[in-house]
Amino acid sequence: MKKYNKYAIRSAKAELKSEVADSYLNWLWWIIEPFCFMLIYTFIFSVVFKSKELYFASFVMIGQALWQFFERMLTGSVKLILSNRDLVVKVYVPKYILLYSKSLTYLFKMFISLVIAFGLMMFQHVPLSWHVIFVIPTLLVLYLVTFGISLLLMHFGVTLNDLSNLTNIALKMTFYLSGIFFNIRTRIGGTLGYFILRLNPAAFLMDEMRKALIFAEMPNFKWLAIWLLIGLLLTIIGISTINKNENSYAKVI
């Protein structure tokens, strides 16, 4: 990764510039889009469904920021090799670098959403504490787990044409079980809530992020460590699998 880091950064910058090249509002769309989604979710669940969650707008914005990174990485990885056919066939670049470069664009957008979340927290007078430092390990675990899953999807997406549809269906189901606009601990609770928070990485990491930023609570170090190890294992398996099959990708596509 160190060897190809400059390429990955330049590629990510080029993609970000191309996204807004023909837009009048340009980079402002990266702020407008997450903010508008937050307003929609806040209106529906606080006004229509009468949610009483504390600091609800900030609560939703934090969940949305993490979910969009998770979703974009997974959906974007399935067809990543196929969509970079010319690069895969003509130039040698380790294929996982394609995902690494793509992840930089999604990280950039997630950090914009988190900046908006901090702004909302200030507006809502959310008291910040020293627990905010636990944002760092939470984001690290989120990246590793998401990157590891995406590597496997990228590999199998070359030969499994239906994987993209299956991934979208799985993500839609996961979306409603991740607690983006409700607190799983208080709304579900019990054994079901316990297992959702432990076995769904998106739900668990959203909860940990909100603990650090909103509720000033200590993280669950045990399960952060478990998901860190799972993320490392998935990443090692994913990179190993892709390296073993690099020569076959050009033939398949």
Image (cartoon, grey):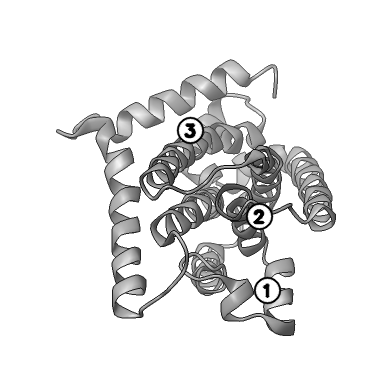
Residue at 83% in and 50% down: 225
138 to the left or right of 27: right
Residue type at mark 2 is Glu
Residue drawn at point x = 28 percent, y = 53 percent: 36
Q: Pointer 1: residues within 10 angstroms few (<14), some, or many (20+)?
A: many
Query: Which of marks 3 and 2 precedes in the sequence?
Result: 3
Residue 18 spot, x, y in % from top left: 31, 30
Of discs 2 and 3, which sits in the foreground?
Answer: 2
Q: Within 10 angstroms of label 2, few (less than 14), some, or many (20 or more) residues?
A: many
According to the image, label 2 marks what residue? 208
* Residue drawn at the location 42% of the way across and 47% of the way down: 125
Q: SS for tag 3? A: helix
Q: Residues within 10 Å of mark 3 (few under 14, many from 20)?
A: few
The quadrant of the image that shows the N terminus is: top right
Query: Is 56 on the left-hand or right-hand side of 97?
Result: left
Label 2 to label 3: alpha-carbon separation: 41 Å
Mark seen at residue 179: none
Relative depth, front residue between 32 and 83: 32
Q: Is residue 232 above or below residue 181?
A: above
Give the Cα distance between marks 2 and 1. Answer: 13 Å
